[in-house]
Image (cartoon, rainbow, N blue to C red):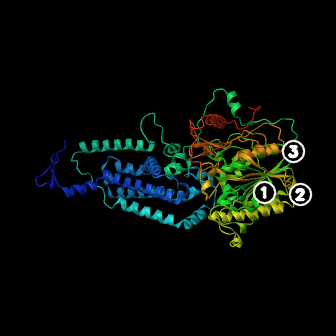
């Protein structure tokens, strides 16, 4: 036993068991030099810096959170500590192990120096990721996950894009540098000493040190798992939802290192089973489409344009009521097409990112919860729109002005069934390269218009535009042609809209034009400005437009549409007469259709005038679309909740079961 006995003058402490007499000042110095106290202090510095990152994240993206009360923000910040603990313990696990190993060499100067730089590097990476996501969040409305490496893994200009982003957001670079200064100063210069109490006998030193080590490991495991107990599963991205009222708040609870690390293992879908009777399940919802085999095919050409970042908010046609009726948007040509085609009051993306859109549009598969092409089900047997039409004699081609390996589009297009791929390599003239992503939209769409003329009719041609993408540049010749908007994106939207106008002008002179069905859809939203669009529904709102040059499709229809509906609706227009599988609806045949997407741990179902929130087990909210959505109607309308909950359960059971069991094609109508 160690006895601490103060001398009469209270200035010295006798450690009687060891025969040591220390002044209070010396004892204080020794405590400050204690390796365990130093470790705790340095980890607390990192916790503080993570909360500062969260505070800056909130300030930078305040337009998404301005209606949150102080109590709600306190709950979010306190909840964030749980996820910060996991991330910080993960990133500092090597450093913590070095400091806690029960051996005396941990006090060696060289050993301590190595540990110090491991601490700086690992925490610097975590803080840099948080700072970067402060900006990137506005493009995806979620924290960055591990899929970003596979999404951009084939880009060969990432360094240029990254450098430009740093210059544009120089103030966040300064913030990161300030964080690193605090991290270094908080670490301190003092080397740890053996202990406040020098154990003279190894018989005491090693058992005590080993005990501290084992307790520390146990606490670290608890921190990484997010709790203890056999019934406690490791904390996941979805757990952040318990601290919020809206899915958009989840990224504020989380931190980027946690999202990245947890998503490395977050790919396998859970099999969700709500209905034991498959007949009951199919009667509520089935993705199997069985059109009458007596239909006579209508061999129209099909052109599908997937427009980068053309969120519905930017399109004046849908927003005549905004800004007191004075809002005109940034897409005068797209407005004219919407006015002459079939479009919808409520239309949504099935994912957050560009890479989600191709699967959503061409395969009719949503990004729930991760992009299909980045999931372990990527090699499932599929039969997408290009595949189905090629079997019926269509020539198929996909156009994208990126380098051919960019975004993995070329590889995925091969699986989808596209016969030809036209990228930057085929375009050939690098003088039209925008310096970041690919060929300028105007030049590439003109190239596409010419190449389509070489395809044998009937054909399916699709394009993914690029220019309305960060860093939001336009060709030098148009610097003063297109006026700035509220945010930098608006200028590039104007330019891309003009490029689409020129495409249609050129195409209208071609013999294939009049016999072509055009589909125009955005990949995802970007850059919300109006408060009317700052809600869980409209954060996915994109235009979906079907257009024929003869004006025969002209209708502004009240109802719900989604990217997943494009494939079955196109097949419906073509009188396709064989069974196929699609998670969307033929918008001209299904009056009871609905849309589904995934929003930071919450499944969202849009039907009629309602949005249902479902967490996989229970409904968490019911809201009326196109309102401020501040009122949860769940308790007021239990019958509506019950009806919509049956739909989302049936949808999720079909989706997870078919994805896991590799049943994304139709076999005898099953």
At horizontal 76% and vertical 32% (from top left) the residue drawn is: 669
Disc nearer the start of the sequence (1/3):
3
Drawn side of residue 279 relative to residue 33, left or right:
right
Measured as percent of width and height from the top left, residue 446 is found at: 79, 63
Q: How far apart are marks 1 and 3 (CA)?
A: 23 Å
- Residue 501 versus residue 397: which sits nearer the camera? 501
Which of discs 1 and 2 lies nearer the camera? The answer is 1
- Residue 156 versus residue 206: which sits nearer the camera? 156
Query: SS at mark 1?
Result: helix
Q: Distance between the residues labelled 1 and 2?
A: 20 Å
Q: Mark 2 points at which residue?
A: 511
Q: Distance between the residues labelled 3 and 2?
A: 18 Å
Measured as percent of width and height from the top left, residue 58 is found at: 50, 56
Disc nearer the start of the sequence (3/2):
3
Q: Is residue 122 above or below residue 567?
A: below
Q: Mark 3 points at which residue?
A: 298
Q: Mark 1 points at which residue?
A: 337
Q: Look at the image and tell me whether residue 426 can be seen.
A: no
At horizontal 72% and vertical 62% (from top left) the residue drawn is: 496
Residue 444, quarter of the rendered image: bottom right
Disc nearer the start of the sequence (1/2):
1
Q: Is residue 131 above or below residue 298?
A: below
Q: Is residue 410 above or below residue 637?
A: below
Q: Residues within 10 Å of mark 2 (few under 14, many from 20)?
A: few
Q: Residues within 10 Å of mark 1 (few under 14, many from 20)?
A: many
Quadrant into which the N terminus falls? top left
Q: Residue furthest left?
A: 8
């Amino acid at each position: 036993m160690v006895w601490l006995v103060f001398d009469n003058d209270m200035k010295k402490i006798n450690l009687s068991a060891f025969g040591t007499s220390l002044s209070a000042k010396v004892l204080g110095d020794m405590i400050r030099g204690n390796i365990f106290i130093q470790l705790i202090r340095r980890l607390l510095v990192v916790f503080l810096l993570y909360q500062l990152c969260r505070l800056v994240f909130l300030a930078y993206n305040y337009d998404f959170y301005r209606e949150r009360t102080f109590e709600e923000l306190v709950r979010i910040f306190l909840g964030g500590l749980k996820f910060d603990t996991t991330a910080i313990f993960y990133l500092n696990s090597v450093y913590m192990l070095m400091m806690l190993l029960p051996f005396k060499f941990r006090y060696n100067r060289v050993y301590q120096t190595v540990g110090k730089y491991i601490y700086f590097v690992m925490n610097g990476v975590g803080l840099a990721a948080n700072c970067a996501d402060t900006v990137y969040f506005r493009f995806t409305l979620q924290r960055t996950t591990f899929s970003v490496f596979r999404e951009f893994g084939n880009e060969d200009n990432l360094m240029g894009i990254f450098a430009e982003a740093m210059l544009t957001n120089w103030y966040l670079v300064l913030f990161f540098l300030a964080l690193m200064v605090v991290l270094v100063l908080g670490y301190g210069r003092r080397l740890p000493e053996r202990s406040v109490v020098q154990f003279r006998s190894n018989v005491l030193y090693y058992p005590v040190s080993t005990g501290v080590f084992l307790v520390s490991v146990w606490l670290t495991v608890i921190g990484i798992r997010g709790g203890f107990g056999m019934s406690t599963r490791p904390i996941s991205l979805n757990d952040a939802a318990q601290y919020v009222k809206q899915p958009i708040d989840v990224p504020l609870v989380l931190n980027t290192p946690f999202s990245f690390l947890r998503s490395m293992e977050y790919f396998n879908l859970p099999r969700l089973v709500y209905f034991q009777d498959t007949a009951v399940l199919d009667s509520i919802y089935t993705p199997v489409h069985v059109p009458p085999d007596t239909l006579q095919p209508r061999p129209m050409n099909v052109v599908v344009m997937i427009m980068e970042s053309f969120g519905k908010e930017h399109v004046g046609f849908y927003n005549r009521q905004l800004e007191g009726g004075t809002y005109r948007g940034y897409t005068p040509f797209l407005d004219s097409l919407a006015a002459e085609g079939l479009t919808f009051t409520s239309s949504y993306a099935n994912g957050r990112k560009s890479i989600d859109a191709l699967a959503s549009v061409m395969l009719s598969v949503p990004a729930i919860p991760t992009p299909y092409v980045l999931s372990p089900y990527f090699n499932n047997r599929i039969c997408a729109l290009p595949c189905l039409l090629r079997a019926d004699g269509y020539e198929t081609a996909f156009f994208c002005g990126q380098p051919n390996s960019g975004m993995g589009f070329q590889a995925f297009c091969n699986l989808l069934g596209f016969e030809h791929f036209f990228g930057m390599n085929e375009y050939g003239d690098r003088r039209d390269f925008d310096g970041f992503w690919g060929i300028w939209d105007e030049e590439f769409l003109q190239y596409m218009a010419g190449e389509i003329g070489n395809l044998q009719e009937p054909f399916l041609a699709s394009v993914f535009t690029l220019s309305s993408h960060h860093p939001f540049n336009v060709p030098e010749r148009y610097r003063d042609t297109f006026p700035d908007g509220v945010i930098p994106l608006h200028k590039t939207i104007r330019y891309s809209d003009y490029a689409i106008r020129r495409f249609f002008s050129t195409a209208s002179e071609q013999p294939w034009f009049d016999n072509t069905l055009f589909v125009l859809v955005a990949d995802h939203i970007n850059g919300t400005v109006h408060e009317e669009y700052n809600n869980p529904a409209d954060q996915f709102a994109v235009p979906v437009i079907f257009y024929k040059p003869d004006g025969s499709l002209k209708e502004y229809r009240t109802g719900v549409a989604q990217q997943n509906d494009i494939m079955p609706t196109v097949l419906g227009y073509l009188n396709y007469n064989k069974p196929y599988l699609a998670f969307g609806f033929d918008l001209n045949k299904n009056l009871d259709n609905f849309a589904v997407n995934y929003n930071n741990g919450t499944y969202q179902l849009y039907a009629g005038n309602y949005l249902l929130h479902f967490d996989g087990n229970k409904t968490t909210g019911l809201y009326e679309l196109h309102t401020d959505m501040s009122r949860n109607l769940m308790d007021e309308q239990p019958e509506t909740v019950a009806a919509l909950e049956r739909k989302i359960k049936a949808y999720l059971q079909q989706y997870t079961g078919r994805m896991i069991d590799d049943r994304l094609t139709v076999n005898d109508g099953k």
